[in-house]
Amino acid sequence: MVSSETTNNVADELDTLLLRLQKLVVDYVKEGQNADNAVVRYYSPEDLYKRIDLALPDSGAGVDGKGLNHLDYDRLTRLNIVETFDLIKDTLKYSVNTWNPRFMDKLYAGTNPIGVVSELLLAILNSNSHVYHCSPVLSLMEIEVTRATAQLLNMGKDSGGILCPGGSASNLLAVVTARNKLYPSIKSKGYMPRPFNADADYGVLKLFTSSHSHYSIDQAAQVLGLGLDNVVKVPTDDEGRMLVSELERLLQESVARGETPFFINATSGTTVMGAFDPLDKIARLAKKYNCWCHADGSWGGSAVFSDQVTRTKDWFRGSDLVDSFTINPHKLLGVPLQCSMLLTPHNGHVMFARTNSIKADYLFHGNAVDLGAATIGCGRRPDALKVFLAWKFYGKQGLGQRVDRALCSASEFMDLVRRRRGFILVKDPCPFLQICFWYVPESIKDQVDAWKSQSDGGALGKIAVVTRTIQQRINHSGAYLVDHAPLPGVPDFFRIVINAPTVSVDRDLVGLLDRIESVGNDVNWEKIFEQ
Amino acid sequence: MVSSETTNNVADELDTLLLRLQKLVVDYVKEGQNADNAVVRYYSPEDLYKRIDLALPDSGAGVDGKGLNHLDYDRLTRLNIVETFDLIKDTLKYSVNTWNPRFMDKLYAGTNPIGVVSELLLAILNSNSHVYHCSPVLSLMEIEVTRATAQLLNMGKDSGGILCPGGSASNLLAVVTARNKLYPSIKSKGYMPRPFNADADYGVLKLFTSSHSHYSIDQAAQVLGLGLDNVVKVPTDDEGRMLVSELERLLQESVARGETPFFINATSGTTVMGAFDPLDKIARLAKKYNCWCHADGSWGGSAVFSDQVTRTKDWFRGSDLVDSFTINPHKLLGVPLQCSMLLTPHNGHVMFARTNSIKADYLFHGNAVDLGAATIGCGRRPDALKVFLAWKFYGKQGLGQRVDRALCSASEFMDLVRRRRGFILVKDPCPFLQICFWYVPESIKDQVDAWKSQSDGGALGKIAVVTRTIQQRINHSGAYLVDHAPLPGVPDFFRIVINAPTVSVDRDLVGLLDRIESVGNDVNWEKIFEQ
């Protein structure tokens, strides 16, 4: 049925394709590494549809129309005009080049050579880390890398964890685990009070998280049927850190109302400002009120790889006291997307399996190294390999130096913003790697000068328009990708994320401020404000 | 801060690494394509720990210890003995080689050259398909490939969908969507009856699914706080198809008890037997009882790519009537893990966004092509590219032929099993691509001959022991990876999944039966039974 010729052709076909692709991807990286190239050739969806062939054909294109397709040499041939590699070239051409250090829009950056290697390795293995006998090496790597990372957080010798498809998924698993562990009857009977759930030993369940925390906590609450209204948003200080006194007040009030607080989320590196909540104090309050304490370190958690950080900052004080901790190496450590870990001091993946697993005899035959049982999914990408390999390649030191370098660049950038006329830091100093600021063009300075002290609504609105207008023009030019961000009570501001190790302060960051200023001077603001 | 030399070195480093890896991976594919090689060199976790260096170092290994590491040339050098490529070689050596057609254990197989190319492309892009401006091309590909697949299911011109990290995640999103759409107050107030949720217009919510369905439906129920006890398992016929009459009876009884049925899951290709539930009849009942009708086609849904299937089988009759449909191209279509789509006729991803999204101003600035809003996650791997590229490369025809070839091999294999002495099909014919059978060694034939008709408990137990013993010996030998499966009331049986297009009936499948027989003859069964 399958000739040996066909069989060999699969490897040959791969060889041919990889050789051809290698030149494209290396050129793409070179293009990205030259920061003067565009980060993206921006087109609206309507325009992009015209530039790239997105029709899905009945017959395949194959490679060069020469029929290397190994399914059927005779029938699947050159019926399609557009070749696969033309499409690949177009995909590269019109995508965001994340290797460019001027991609500063999100909390991830481009990856690195060993990251690409690890993805290629995963592609070749096409493995699934649900059961050990299908992914023996990858399962052990997952156990080792989660244990080692949990130990950086001082979670002790029984610590460990599990990989989830992203930070939101890790946070969701944390909430599910907390609920099932504290109120196990919900797993079988559902989240209903008596008499619907005769075993109900709780009032309305409440989650506590800061007003600056990530929306995945709200998503978890709505998915779990707890309801968005039962997420209590704790006020923060002006740096974005949860106010512990407010947390305690809100916990007391909740208990007084007969509710059942059960989950407190602390954030280690908030999405907008980069603030670190005080883990030690929050964890102690959690214990007092019989709550699970989770830390969402999706963004900032990776800073624990830096000795300089753990020596000089209090960001991880109390990390040994939390019940679970999310870290996304795909953000700050440059590991390719997706790579997120949920860590715990309480017996690692075994605890997650015991709390959340469901009897599925056809998959799990009782092996303790079958990691899939610890998740709420089934099949799973072995993402652990990627952070494992990055650690082997760079060492903890190398990963920590990446963090240090980013912090150093961020600090220098903050200085630049601070000293430059027309630029105002939202919070000085910025707590982490997001530099947040407003820019007031010289031409409208008089109009908005007093906005900060007087809370002039009109001036506030103008500043927001300035931010969004300049940001959009810069992004659409492709020179940089940067984001604007909102916070209650203040106008939208620029949020510049410093992450890639190839960011140059003199070239990329001074250049960004120059460009903001230059766009700001070019725009006729009166005309914009009228619209 | 970063010299141009360092900058160029990133691309050069990638070039070097890829060149070096290419030979390894092509050799690995060649090894896998020679079916006589081991599928896996099996070791227990304890033994594997001794054979592969899994310690995570403080300093990085770099490449060849020559310091290509671009973070810091001076400090990160040859401190580690084991080089990264030795580790990669070991990873390949001790992993399951899914390119080997004798990997028949799970519902996925090895991928193919264009699959590897698509993963490498994703690695290079390191993109995140939450917002359009970060993933313009990939977002449009996702919209097009979900629309095109939904249209194969006759879901109409407004259909489309969204990619999720696996079939369980797609099924979970389907249940969340159904609940939020039918009972929107739960999203904000939580799943509580009055007076806790003053807007509650439901009794205890109930899900219906067949007793042969995948455990992800149960997982969804427990995650959502609906409770495992509120999943109603509908009996099946002896092929594993949901009995519609039983479904209706159970719905009526539930309503009579004052409960609120809201979700019916039909399975298109069950995990163990491969049965297809009758979508048309189930969808009509769902409508009658105001339930959301979901089809879990994680495994069998991809068969819709085959014209032969849609012409000659009734598997997809009624696919136009369901509210949502899960398809995992990473299973039957050879797309690399993970790739799962959740499809709907009700306005595609826009419906998912409207139903499930949460205001997160710092990420979503109001763009309708920001697909992340349609998920319960945030960041997301752009897995759609992989099925898009496979479709472009092979065409719908090529993908359909892969299905046809598998069905043809499965049918031939079934014939072999049927005709061979000592082998008994669990259900004749097997409905899909899983060939399920028992094997009774000649030496114990007399002891267990009457087991099927007489339900002799002792004999049943012996057959289960035979299945598990032979399966484990074959798997540990590495010659094949196959699975055993349980079903209530019958002893464990072999479940052989036919998927890879490189499976040869004469070589791989005859060879498997020979091996089962030969192990069966070698074992001293009396001794095993005594244990």
Image: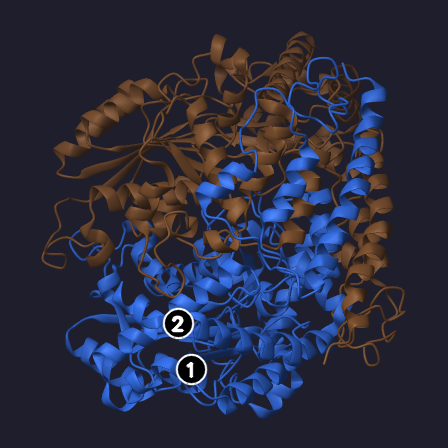
Chain colours: A brown, B blue
Under mark 1, the amino acid is Asp
Q: Do the numbered discs 1 and 2 sit on residues whose CB atoms are within 8 Å?
A: no
Q: Quadrant of the N terminus of chain B?
A: top right
The residue nearer to you, when weighing B9 against B491, is B491
Q: Earlier in the sequence, mark 1 or mark 2?
A: 1
Residue A513, image quadrant: top right
Q: Secondary structure at mark 1?
A: loop
Q: What residue appears at the point 40 percent right and 80 percent down from the top-left corner?
A: B441
- Above or below, B267 relative to A486: below
- Above or below, A297 relative to A7: above
The residue nearer to you, when weighing B101 against A226, is B101
x, y percent for residue A360 = 35, 62
Marked residue chain, label 1: B
x, y percent for residue B81 = 65, 24
Q: What residue appears at the point 70 percent right and 26 percent down from the top-left corner?
A: B62
The residues tagged by marks 1 and 2 sit, at their Cα atoms, a distance apart of: 28 Å
Q: Is residue A350 left or right of residue A120?
A: left
Q: Which residue is mark 1?
A: B277
Q: Residues within 10 Å of mark 2 (few under 14, many from 20)?
A: many
The mark closer to the camera, 1 or 2, is 2
- Above or below, B260 relative to A260: below
Q: Secondary structure at mark 2?
A: helix
x, y percent for residue A129 = 50, 51
Q: Is residue A271 left or right of residue A218?
A: right
Residue B8, image quadrant: top right
Q: Which residue is mark 2?
A: B467
Marked residue chain, label 2: B
The residue nearer to you, when weighing A258 against B432, is B432
- Do dots 1 and 2 share one subunit? yes
Q: Residues within 10 Å of mark 1 (few under 14, many from 20)?
A: many
